[in-house]
């Protein structure tokens, strides 16, 4: 992963954020030979972990990845579509490698700070090692996850109210004693209602355990996690291997996730299920569709809203389920 | 008899609206003070923060910027509304009243 140079050419597509959404959009584009640059503000892709990692096996089919057993931590036999736990670190690094193999570029330690539009071209301001760089692009795909900073700088209204916000704390734990490692556990408690504690076992004595509670709860997720796990007999002796701190938006999905030359994908378009907190599948699906839309726009040499709005139609099938979950969450808040 | 009941009800109404009014007034005063005496408050990020990015999304003035691995808060933009402090999973951000 190279350092940024001053770059005078116009890049076809720039992606802000190397999460599952940004990487899958980058993969699809680089496979088609498009010049794509990905900027990631962290120093490593996929670390630190802020996720429960439960997702659907379908994602590998979406991305056309064959030997995916190496990413799977465990498979459950459950009726819901989300049935495997993956290692996001391994998975995301694999995607990054594939992108670089196909000719795309990933710049780490680079924060996309601002975006301006001039003469149908975007100019991005990037902070890298405390220095500013400017780079121009035809299309910007924003995949910044929960942050919602660049999206708002670009003029989207993605502010999240505390009631539409879940703050989470969890850990990969060892030395726990899970009664049945072939299922997932959802543990409810009135102190965190309508949030809950999740246990996704990796084996009999390790797993991904965490809790999410609403922003209006007033208590700290970390504090309640320590308290609740010490009250449950089979979690009491657990030791933390890796800490998970993160936040999920449980808001309505963005109705208009496109704009002249700009697309919003994954968590930054709030494509996250309000009840289950599932967002990896939605991120990958929307990333793939954004890549397809960008391809069409580039081939027609028109990156305006008129062409990019087909992206919204392509991801339309995600919306009914997300809206249903949101309304259910609102009902749960009222019945608190 | 009827008049008396009406009278009592009216008194009750005045009383209730007085209480509601007072409580609203109190809130307005506190909020107003927060804006007026902006310099009296201080906002700080501590070592608990993992730069998870949650508080940025709830900041309505875009005062927080996530330059990994730390946050940068623009003290001129911040209104000390307290949203960020409220939603943080780990007590990474804190608003103090400055002692002078
Ligand atoms: C505690 C927790 C548990 C979860 N559990 C599950 C689960 O079990 N199953 C599931 O499916 N989903 C789960 N989710 C949701 C899931 O993690 C997200 O929906 C998903 O990661 C969204 O992907 P993304 O690529 O859009 O964003 P992210 O994965 O958040 O990636 C965004 C990336 O962009 C970078 N970035 C942000 N802004 C900039 C910028 N301006 N410039 C450069 N880089 C930037 C960030 O550093 C980050 O790496 C969970 C979330 C949390 C917080
Ligand atoms: S202050 Fe809290 S919510 Fe904000 S980035 Fe740090 S840990 Fe996350
Ligand atoms: S107190 Fe309010 S305005 Fe200030 S940084 Fe926090 S959320 Fe933003």
Image: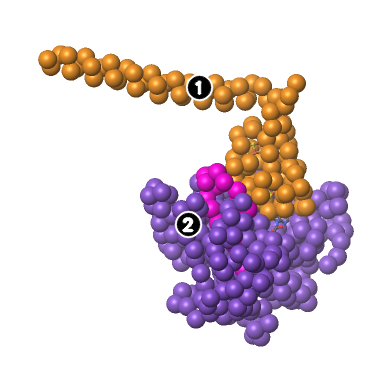
Chain colours: A purple, B orange
**At 55% across and 78% down in the image, what residue appears?**
A181
**Residue placed furthest toward the bottom:** A67
**Residue A204 shows in the view:** yes
**Residue A18 shows in the view:** no
Chain that bears disc 2: A
Q: Nearer the viewer, mark 2 or mark 1?
A: 2
Chain that bears disc 1: B
Extent of the magenta region: A208-222
**At 68% across and 39% down in the image, what residue appears?**
B94
Q: Is residue A80 magenta?
A: no
The relative height of residue A197 versus residue B7 in the rendered view (above or below) is below
**Does B90 sit left or right of B71 as displayed?**
left
Marks 2 and 1 sit apart, C-alpha to C-alpha, by 34 Å
Dot 2, how many residues are within 10 Å of its Cα: few (below 14), some (14-19), or many (20+)? few
Query: Pointer 2: what residue?
Result: A189
**At 62% across and 78% down in the image, what residue appears?**
A203
């Amino acid at each position: 992963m190279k350092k940024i140079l001053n770059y005078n050419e116009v890049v076809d597509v720039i992606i802000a954020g190397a999460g599952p959404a940004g990487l899958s959009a980058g993969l699809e584009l680089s496979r088609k030979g498009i010049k794509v640059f990905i900027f990631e503000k962290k120093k490593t892709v996929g670390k630190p972990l802020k996720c429960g990692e439960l997702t659907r096996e379908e994602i590998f089919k979406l991305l056309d990845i064959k030997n995916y057993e190496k990413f799977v931590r465990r498979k459950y036999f459950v009726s819901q579509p989300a049935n495997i736990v993956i290692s996001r670190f391994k998975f995301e690094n694999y995607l990054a490698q594939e992108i670089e193999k196909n000719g795309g570029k990933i710049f780490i330690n680079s924060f996309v700070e601002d975006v301006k539009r001039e003469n149908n071209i975007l100019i991005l301001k990037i902070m890298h090692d405390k220095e500013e760089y400017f780079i121009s692009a035809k299309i910007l795909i924003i995949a910044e996850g929960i942050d919602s900073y660049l999206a708002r700088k670009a003029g989207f209204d993605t502010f999240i109210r505390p009631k539409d916000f879940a703050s989470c704390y969890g850990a990969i734990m060892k030395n726990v004693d899970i009664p049945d490692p072939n299922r997932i556990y959802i543990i409810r408690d009135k102190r965190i209602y309508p949030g809950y504690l999740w246990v996704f076992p990796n084996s009999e004595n390790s797993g991904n355990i965490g809790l999410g509670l609403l922003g209006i709860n007033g208590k700290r997720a970390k504090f309640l996690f320590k308290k609740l796990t010490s009250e449950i007999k089979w979690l009491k002796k657990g030791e933390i291997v890796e800490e998970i701190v993160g936040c999920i938006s449980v808001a309505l999905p963005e109705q208009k996730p496109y704009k002249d030359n700009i697309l919003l994908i994954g968590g930054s378009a709030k494509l996250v299920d309000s009840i289950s907190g599932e967002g990896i599948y939605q991120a990958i699906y929307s990333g793939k569709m954004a890549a397809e839309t960008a391809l069409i726009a580039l081939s027609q040499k028109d990156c305006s809203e008129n062409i990019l709005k087909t992206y919204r139609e392509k991801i339309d099938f995600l919306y009914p389920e997300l809206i249903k979950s949101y309304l259910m969450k609102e009902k749960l808040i009222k019945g608190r | 008899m009827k008049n008396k009941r009406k009278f009592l009800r009216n008194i009750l109404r005045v009383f209730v609206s007085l209480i509601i009014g007072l409580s609203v007034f109190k809130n307005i005063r506190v909020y107003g003070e927060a804006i007026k005496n902006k310099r009296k408050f201080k906002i700080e990020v501590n070592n608990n923060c993992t730069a998870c990015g949650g508080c940025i999304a709830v900041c309505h003035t875009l005062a927080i910027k996530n330059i990994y691995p730390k946050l940068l808060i623009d003290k001129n933009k911040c209104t000390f509304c307290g949203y960020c402090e409220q939603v943080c999973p780990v007590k990474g951000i804190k608003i103090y009243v400055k002692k002078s």
